[in-house]
């Protein structure tokens, strides 16, 4: 029995196999227990020696099982360690990083520039009512901007804001009669335009508003020239052309030196040397009055710049629809400007 047991235990290849062998040799109905039973039939004088020998055998078999068990456990542990090994020399898996959208890049550049001049950034809701979009902006009831074909109405009263001037009106009302106000208000605006290379039914503007005690048109000019130089280069100049907006008086359209020819005249600027970039003016006294300011005490300027327009000029983009079709090849090109 002894040799057979030792060999069989050494050959057990798993813990469960080893357990079967333990039962076979040491169990209640096992081989060693059977030897004990045989003792009854032995002559009296042989019993003690036989009993002692069986006990030794029992202990040795028990020890052999314990030893094999430790071995098997070690083997299993080694296997586990091997299978969980990490090869730290493998190169990392690369994953694709997103990048900022060109409109976001321009928006942040404008925000940084104006925050540097002491402006606050204020946003508003995309859905506004007629009062803030038009009424408080001194836009009369029969003005074409109010017509269904130009604005996206949700119901007769509420619409998607057609310009960030709607944010300006809310800021004015909330601030009155405190002075000064210096804010820029970026946001999406919506119009019922047919999309083409230069029109989009949704685009972005940034409104600027300064109200104080003697805020002149030359303050506006200095501010916008600073902006133009930062955006397009130190060699750029701006010029004002008379214009009309219901919420400013006087109103101007602002041109910047053509970035293609540097002002000499080329097809891009139709030979003029200038490119139009935004609308602006001195805030209309009616607008100040409606918001709760006294136009005899304070005045100010406002401007509204199109973010797409700036991005198109800056990066030479020829179609506004590129901003909204999300072609990865288009978007990827702006990684280097972040
Ligand atoms: N709200 C005007 C537009 O949408 C832009 C503008 C803003 C003009 C502020 C003057 C002053 O075109």
Image (tube, rainbow, N blue to C red):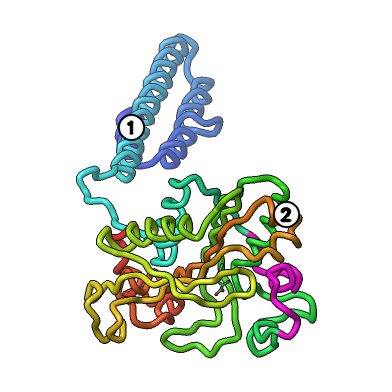
- Nearer to us in this view, 309 or 57: 309
Query: N-terminal of the two: label 2 or label 1?
Result: 1
**Disc marking residue 156:** none
Residue 162: image x %, image y %? 62, 75
Q: Could you tell me which residue is drawn at 36 percent across and 66 percent down?
A: 238
Residue at the outermost front position: 296
Q: Position of residue 206 (x, y in %)?
A: 52, 64
Of residues 284 and 87, the one drawn nearer to the viewer in this rendering: 284
Quarter assignment of residue 68:
top left
Q: Residue at x 38, y 69 (%)?
A: 239
Residue shown at the point (31%, 34%) measured from the top left: 10
Classify 277 as above or below 13: below
- Judge whether residue 308 can be spotted in this image: no
Provide the secondary structure element on which disc 1 rests. helix
**Which quadrant holds the N terminus?**
top left
In the rendered image, which quarter contains the C terminus?
bottom left
- Picture layout, residue 306 above or below residue 182: below
Query: Percent position (x, y) of residue 152?
Result: 67, 82
**CA–CA distance in space, label 2 to label 1:** 90 Å
Query: Residue 119, how many percent across, how many down?
Result: 52, 48
**Ligand 1 within 8 angstroms of badge 1 C-beta:** no
**Crowd band around label 1 with a 10 angstrom C-alpha radius: few (<14), some (14–19), many (20+):** few
For residue 301, side relative to residue 239 (left or right): right
User: Is residue 290 within the magenta segment?
Assistant: no
Q: Quadrant of residue 63?
A: top left
- Quadrant containing ligand 1: bottom right
Q: To which residue does mark 2 refer?
A: 294
Magenta range is 124-142
Kindly identify which residue carries mark 1: 74
């Amino acid at each position: 029995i002894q040799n057979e047991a030792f060999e069989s235990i050494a050959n057990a290849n798993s813990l469960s196999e080893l357990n079967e062998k333990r039962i076979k040799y040491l169990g209640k109905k096992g081989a060693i227990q059977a030897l004990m039973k045989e003792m009854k039939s032995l002559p009296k004088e042989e019993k003690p020696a036989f009993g002692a020998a069986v006990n030794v055998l029992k202990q040795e078999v028990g020890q052999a099982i314990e030893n094999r068990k430790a071995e098997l456990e070690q083997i299993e542990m080694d296997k586990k360690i091997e299978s969980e090994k990490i090869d730290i020399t493998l190169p990392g898996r690369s994953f694709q990083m997103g990048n900022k959208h060109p409109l976001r890049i321009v928006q942040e550049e404008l925000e940084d520039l104006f925050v540097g001049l002491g402006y606050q950034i204020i946003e508003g809701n995309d859905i506004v009512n007629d009062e803030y979009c038009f009424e408080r902006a001194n836009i009369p009831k029969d003005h074409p901007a109010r017509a269904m074909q130009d604005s996206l109405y949700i119901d007769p009263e509420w619409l998607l804001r057609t310009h960030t001037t709607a944010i300006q009106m809310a800021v004015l009302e909330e601030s009155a009669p405190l002075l000064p106000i210096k804010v820029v208000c970026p946001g999406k605006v919506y119009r019922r335009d047919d999309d083409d290379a230069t029109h989009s039914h949704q685009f972005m503007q940034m409104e600027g508003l300064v109200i104080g005690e003697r805020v002149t048109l030359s303050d506006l000019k200095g501010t916008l020239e600073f902006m133009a130089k930062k955006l397009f280069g130190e060699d750029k100049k701006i010029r004002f052309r008379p214009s009309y907006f219901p919420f400013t008086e006087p109103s101007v359209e602002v041109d910047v030196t053509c970035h293609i020819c540097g002002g000499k005249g080329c097809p891009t600027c139709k030979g003029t040397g200038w490119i139009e970039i935004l609308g602006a003016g001195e805030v209309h006294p009616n607008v100040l009055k409606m918001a709760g300011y006294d136009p005899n005490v304070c005045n100010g300027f406002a401007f509204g710049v199109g973010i797409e327009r700036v991005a198109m000029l800056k990066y030479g983009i020829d179609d506004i629809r590129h901003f909204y079709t999300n072609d990865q090849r288009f978007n990827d090109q702006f990684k280097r400007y972040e």
